Amino acid sequence: MNSLIVNKLMLSFLTIFFCFSLVVIYLPILVMIIFSFNSGKYQTLPFREPTFEWYISLIADNSFINSFFTSLMMASLASIFATILGFLAAYAFSKAKVPAHALLFGIVVCPLVIPMILIGIGMRLQIVSIGIEPALWLVLLGQTLYVLPLAVINLKNRIDKIPKSMEEASISLGSTRIKSIVLILAPICAPSIFATILLTFTFSFDEFVIAYFLTNFEITLPIRIWTSLVTGFEPKINAVGTAVFMFSLTLGLIAQFILLFKQTEIHKNRAQ
Amino acid sequence: MGNSSNTINPWPFLLPALLLCILFFLIPTVNMVVLSLTTENGYGLDNFKLFFNTPHLTQALYRSIILAISATTIGSLVAWPLAYFIVFCVNKKWRPLFLLAILAPFWTSFTIRAFSWQLVLSDNGVMAWFFELITGISVTLGILYTMNASIFGLALFCSMLTTFTLYGALVSIDIKLIEAASNLGAKPLSIFKDIIFPLGLPGWMAGIFLSFIVCVGDYAVPTLLGGGLKPVLAQIMLSILKGTYDLSQAATIAIILAMTVILCGLPLIVYGLLRRNRLSV
């Protein structure tokens, strides 16, 4: 099949282009990781002695540790909320007759196609005009809204592929609707649900604008990093960057693996 | 049997999600529109007139649009060879792995990615050091904190995003179609022109649209790579809310940004609708 579409010359061009792109994509991250182990206050090469100094000072810095735990809590709760709400909504969109289907689906997934900063500003102006103080629980709800479209789309894709007959069979054998969802539908979707939690967690963990607009004092990790980047350089930023990169990358990759490979598996099963 | 499926009441399942969207998205949006139309003496378009009569705001709008268009264009062009390589030159089994190699940095913080480019592009960064190592000449790059650096940073993001959406379109092309064309004597170039390109188009367009949205609203790359001297609209919004706190001005800017997205996205949406109609006919 290859030779039908791509001749030798094109193949070598495409291969070189792909490799070059990989270098461009990974170079700065590699540089950051190297610098995080570099002693010396200034970010210049050549490399000096290797050190763990920045990682140690990071652990000692309460503001980073606290903001990390705030982010961890926000992202865990937001991802679980969004996945639950998303699962229920996806079920309704997939299996029930929803009036004004297109409109309601549009409303639910709309936050995906609107610049984040507009949603953040909208919420901030809203809470100011009705006189609510910025607080962490608002960030939680805001971030749940932000990752909800991802959850709905992911889970709807999965639920669409489950034939209605499964549920109908259990109901005609005397199960209730709720019971058949919890005992049949949810276990079938378990890999997708797990992937969705991971995916929404990663997005919420890195989310900046909503957290920046909706809270004043209890800051999240992205805000702490941002503050340090715009107010003056601290060498431990490289260490934070490396840690956050590794953390998000691991979670994101697991989620993506499940989604991509499950998808190919489903296609395979269908073909058989 | 068929009857029982119609008896599912969608509302208990739908309501929680819908309520969240209404409270945190629809109502704030309406509120924002109202705020932008509120003036000292009642309602009117004064805020918008003021916006377009303030040179540093219109310049920021202009910069936002140029930045988004440039980055989206570059990203969309880079996406073709990347997606093409992954789909047509890589063994089927390994495709997801190659896609992941391109997408992996995508899952990490925007801010940290932008920051990591500072280390490479700055005047005493890795690129300048490398250049000096090879040529022996010490140069001042002058790339960091310019519009070009912003465009570069966002173009990278756009190319990843568009590669992802284009991959989805290309990977679902039926191989038999290509084989048939080839059996009938089509050359690789005409296979690309008549089969692969038209079928990849929806995925490509989706990538372009999403890229543009992200670029127009981004503050991190313009701040960290573009610097603060020539701000884009998103940077100005950020500084208003943390600084002067002029709410109706912030709302006005937000509405103008939203209009920009809608106006620039309109041709793509119309194209998508026309295409769908043509296909169904």
Image (cartoon, rainbow, N blue to C red):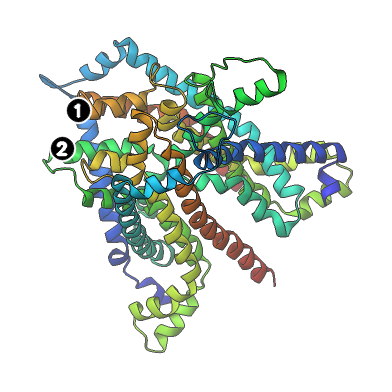
Q: Residues within 10 Å of mark 2 (few under 14, many from 20)?
A: few
Left-right relation of A183 to B186: left
Residue hosting label 2: A128
Q: Residues within 10 Å of mark 1 (few under 14, many from 20)?
A: many
Residue hosting label 1: B247
Q: Position of residue A116 (x, y in %)?
A: 36, 39
The disc placed on residue A37 is none
Amino acid at dot 1: Leu
Mark 2, chain letter? A
Location of the C terminus of chain A (image quadrant): bottom right
Answer yes or no: do the residues labelled 2 and 1 have beta carbons within 8 Å?
yes
Taking the image as drawn, is residue A110 in sight? no
Mark 1, chain letter? B
Spot the residue most to the front: A49
Residue at the image position 56 percent from the left and 48 percent from the top: B104
Indicate the quadrant where residue B46 lies. Answer: top left
**Callout 1: helix, strand or loop?**
helix
Q: Position of residue B110 (x, y in %)?
A: 45, 39
Amino acid at dot 2: Val
- How many labels, in total? 2
**Callout 2: helix, strand or loop?**
helix
Q: Position of residue A1 (x, y in %)?
A: 83, 52
Query: Front-most of B237 and B73?
Result: B237
Query: Front-most of A215 and B2?
Result: A215
Taking the image as drawn, is residue B148 in sight? yes
Left-right relation of B201 to B17: right
Query: Front-most of B250 and A140?
Result: A140
Q: For the residues marked 2 and 1, what is the alpha-carbon distance in whole angstroms?
A: 9 Å
Q: Position of residue A15 (x, y in %)?
A: 76, 41
